[in-house]
């Protein structure tokens, strides 16, 4: 029996109940506000999830590719401006200057997934020039796409399609934009219906079924100063991926280029892989030096504005205030996915909301060997959101022999009282809540750095528990692996329509997949 198998809300933790009650009330207020915003939206079918976003605040354009269709030899210049917006500053153009000629080949910046079908694409744009600026969508190649553009000098807003190299006007009016003013452009492409909005006002509503899926792009023609910001894509798709970053301690200490290769790849591939969220399992650093924390922050901030993520500290991160110095709560407080923390100004135990695959998710991040009060907090969070599927993210939980730490013999360093080990976390938290469905952890070492276990909770629900930790990969357990682990990370793809979860293990540093049964497998019958 676990050492603290007393009734769940006992006198030892009563002092926390009042705090939890306030937290729960705040969470319900957040959800009510969110639902109110949804109710105010246009009464049409909208895509299910925010799958892609980019605010360019980290000064990077990872995942975007420039394509210039203007005069031969001319090269566009896409770069992040001082205000954090994206600027294109070269007048790339070809073709006629006349308003009636609709081809207007210029330059565009491309990203996305060719399989994106029904989606809502939004971006803020501004021009301090007077030529054409706009967006492209359902892009299947340079000869097949839709494009909305507006031109100040020629006084038009225009929606065209290009099919097999031939341009056709779908809709047009005589409006022009104001130079130097920001506008929000939005396209909602659902089935054959295409709606275009400018600052929330619908300007075009047409039906065309020639292109049903494709990438997105930022477009301009003859522009010397076109600006773009706050790109979002909401996609109606069932499948999505959660990426898992195992222990990065040796990367922060010796191999920062490996850590950076991981996050750069995630940022670049987020559209192609349908990545909705990233989980860092802890042991961010090895010896807790300021240099290691600076390196870790440098690598993780590549995800800022591009991919939401949760991060928890491991045992190698404990005993230092540098975690909260380099990853302060203030960095996350205003992010749309961020829910809150156990302690007001400490990120050690945190929670996040996101929606993907038509499912609402709650991620609860717990530190190394969370104490009883933190498990009470996590229990109350899960109970307060019964409509959300819950992912528990923690550093130490599963052993390399596919058992929970503390449930039997283990070669791993196991949390000691008053900390709770994996088995005690199972008894006091994970198995109690019917909506806890997944547990992701690192810390433990094994020959291949992987482990998994499926257990039945108190409410008959299956809980899928997975270990990934490649710090010893290619060496003996407990020893530093080749290049600190060779950059392997987990890609967990959820397929709600099939009730399956596919797990792959990939190294962006080596461009290599591990295909053995421990590192590449499919869970079936998952109730998503």
Image (cartoon, rainbow, N blue to C red):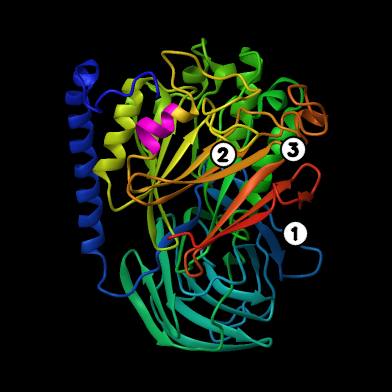
As drawn, which residue projects farthest toward the front? Answer: 1
Q: Residues within 10 Å of mark 1 (few under 14, many from 20)?
A: some
Question: Decide: marks 1, 2 in contact (CB < 8 A)?
Answer: no
Tell me what residue is drawn at x 68 percent, y 79 percent.
95
The residue closer to the viewer here, 129 or 18, is 18
Q: Which residue is depicted at the point 44% across and 86% down? A: 171
Q: Which quadrant, please, contains the C terminus?
A: bottom left
Locate residue 90, reporting x and y percent.
66, 57
> Of circles 1 and 2, which is in front?
2
Quick check: marks 2 and 3 in contact, CB under 8 Å? Answer: no
Identify whether 294 is placed above or below 160: above
Disc 3/disc 1 C-alpha distance (Å)? 47 Å
Q: Is residue 441 visible?
A: yes
To which residue does mark 1 refer?
Answer: 75
Say whether residue 428 is magenta: yes
**Which residue position is annotated with label 3?**
448
Q: What percent of the width, then of the height, locates residue 320?
A: 52, 11
Is 214 within the magenta?
no
Residue located 41% across and 86% down the image: 206
Q: Quadrant of the N terminus?
A: top left
The magenta region covers 424-430
User: Mark 2 vs mark 3: which is more N-terminal?
Assistant: 2
Chief secondary structure of the magenta span?
helix
Is 328 situated above or below 122?
A: above
Residue 182 position by quadrant:
bottom left
- Name the secondary structure under disc 3: loop
Of the image marks 1 and 2, the number of the one nearer the N terminus? 2
């Amino acid at each position: 029996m676990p050492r603290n198998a007393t009734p769940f809300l006992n006198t030892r933790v009563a002092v926390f109940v009042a705090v939890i009650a306030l937290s729960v009330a705040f969470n319900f207020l957040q959800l009510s506000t969110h639902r109110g915003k949804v109710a105010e939206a246009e009464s049409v079918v909208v895509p299910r999830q925010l799958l892609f976003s980019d605010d360019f605040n980290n000064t990077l354009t990872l995942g975007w590719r420039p394509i210039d269709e203007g005069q031969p030899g001319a090269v566009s210049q896409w770069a992040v401006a001082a205000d954090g917006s994206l600027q294109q500053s070269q007048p790339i153009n070809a073709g006629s200057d006349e308003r009636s000629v609709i081809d207007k080949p210029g330059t565009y910046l491309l990203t996305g997934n060719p399989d994106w079908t029904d989606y809502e694409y939004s971006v803020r744009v501004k021009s301090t020039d007077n030529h054409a600026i706009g967006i492209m969508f359902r892009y299947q190649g340079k000869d097949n796409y839709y494009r909305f553009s507006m031109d100040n000098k020629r006084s038009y807003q225009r929606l065209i399609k290009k099919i097999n190299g031939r341009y056709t006007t779908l809709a047009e009016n005589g409006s022009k934009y104001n130079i130097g003013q920001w506008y929000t452009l939005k396209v909602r492409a659902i089935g054959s219906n295409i709606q275009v909005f400018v600052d929330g006002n619908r300007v075009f509503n047409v039906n065309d079924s020639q292109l049903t899926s494709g990438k997105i792009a930022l477009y301009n023609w003859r522009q010397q100063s076109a600006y773009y910001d706050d790109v979002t894509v909401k996609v109606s798709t069932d499948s999505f991926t959660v990426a898992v970053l195992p222990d990065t301690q040796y990367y922060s200490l010796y191999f920062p280029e490996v850590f950076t290769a991981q996050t750069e790849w995630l940022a670049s591939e987020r559209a192609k892989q349908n990545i909705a969220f990233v989980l860092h399992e802890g042991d961010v650093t090895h010896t807790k030096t300021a240099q290691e924390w600076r390196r870790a922050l440098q690598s993780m901030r590549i995800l800022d504005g591009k991919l939401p993520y949760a991060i928890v500290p491991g045992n190698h991160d404990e005993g230092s205030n540098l975690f909260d110095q380099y990853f302060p709560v203030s960095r996350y407080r205003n992010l749309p996915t961020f829910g809150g923390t156990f302690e007001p100004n400490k990120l050690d135990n945190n929670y996040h909301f996101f929606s993907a695959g038509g499912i609402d998710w709650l991620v609860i991040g717990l530190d190394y060997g969370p104490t009883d009060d933190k498990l009470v907090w996590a229990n109350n969070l899960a109970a307060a959101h019964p409509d959300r599927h819950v992912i528990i993210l923690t550093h130490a939980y599963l052993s390399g022999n596919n058992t929970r730490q503390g449930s039997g013999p283990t070669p791993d360093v196991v949390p000691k009282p008053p900390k709770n080990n994996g088995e005690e976390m199972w008894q006091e938290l994970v198995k109690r809540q019917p909506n806890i469905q997944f547990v992701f952890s690192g810390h433990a070492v094994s020959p291949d750095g992987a482990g998994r276990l499926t257990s039945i909770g108190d409410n008959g629900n299956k809980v899928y528990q997975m270990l990934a930790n490649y710090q010893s990969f290619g060496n003996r357990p407990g020893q530093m692996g080749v290049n600190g682990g060779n950059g392997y990370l987990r890609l967990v793809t959820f397929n709600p329509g099939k009730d399956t979860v596919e797990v792959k293990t990939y190294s962006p540093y080596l461009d290599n997949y591990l295909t053995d049964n421990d590192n590449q497998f499919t869970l079936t019958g998952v109730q998503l």
